[in-house]
Amino acid sequence: MRKEKSSEWPLTDVFGICRQTILPLYRKPTFESALISQLLFGECYQVKAINPDQSWYKIFHEDTGLEGWITSKSIKTIQPSDYQNFLSQDFQVVTSPIAVIEYLGSNLYLLPGSRLHFSEIELFNWQDHIGFTGTVRSHAVKAGREELLEIALKYLNAPYQSGGRSIFGLDEIKGFELIYAAAGYRWTLDKMQGKMIDPEQVIPGDLFIFKDLETKVSQVSMYLGAEEVLWMDGKMRISDIDEWESIQINNSSKQYVLKGHSIVS
């Protein structure tokens, strides 16, 4: 039944998988709407509703916890059992800046964070039967600090884009979520793995979180070692930690707090 005072029709037990390089997720069912996020090849979603002319679908992306609209031309449905398997079983995560896969008779370019599942309906035994150029890692194996930093530096100079999740446009918070996810860690800023630590105890691969207590806005940087951090400043760049902290203080109210967070064991 259609929702009261709504322009969408609810759907249940419908699931899909991203089958393109980048799948934009919009706030409303129109291209003029704000970009909420992006899905990468191999990421799965639950279909929640469809608009009246069936040109847009509302989906829920469990990895980011975000809900938004994608076009009907982007829908690729899968069975509920496959959706659960893809979320619970191991998969390969693309780690090279650009990877190429032969898919449906043509080359498809994959970005860091894209997923390759093992399944008869997914990509078959992709390493043996289809062309693939690039590097991948097992998501089930959590990366150590050195590998985590290697993944993070793939995004150096990625320009800022609200909602972006790729080397061609990256949202600050979603960018760090994507980096840790590619390294085998699942977290969001509201529900982070690991533990809070004193900023003086931060080591390479840990985060600095600068929170403005008045606006409740947090800024994040990753400690690289040698007193340097990776952070978003119009683009992902490397700065001296004192420079980064000074910029945050100058842009904040008088009340703020600096914390450390360790996600890697």
Image (cartoon, rainbow, N blue to C red):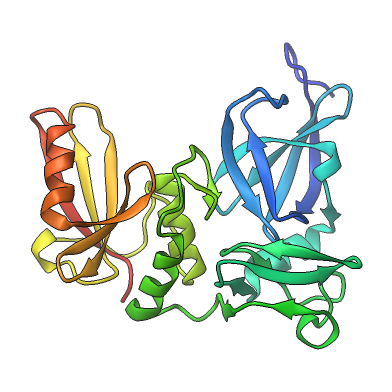
Res. 186 in view: no
Task: Judge left or right: residue 141 versus residue 34.
Answer: left
Quarter of the rendering containing residue 107? bottom right
Which residue occupies 85% across, 41% down?
73
- Residue 83 left/right relative to 244: right
Residue 48 vs residue 229, the one in the foreground: 229
Q: Which of the 4 quarters of the picture holds residue 99? A: bottom right
Is residue 13 visible to the viewer in this orientation of the structure? yes
Residue 37 percent coordinates (x, y): 57, 42
Could you say which is closer to the camera, residue 25 or residue 90?
Answer: 25
- State the residue at coordinates (20%, 45%): 210
Give the quarter of the figure containing the N terminus. Answer: top right
Residue drawn at the location 58% of the way across and 33% of the way down: 35
Q: Where 76 sits versus 263, above or below?
A: above
Q: Quadrant of residue 237?
A: bottom left
Residue 174 position in % (x across, y down): 46, 49
Single out the residue that lies furthest toward the bottom. 128
The C terminus - image quarter: bottom left
As displayed, is residue 229 above or below residue 133?
Answer: above
Residue 252, image x, y percentages: 17, 31
Q: Give the residue at the far top of this rendering.
A: 5
Q: Is residue 173 above or below residue 202?
A: above
As drawn, 232 above or below 41: above
Report x, y in % for residue 77: 84, 52
For this orientation, the residue located farthest to the front is 157
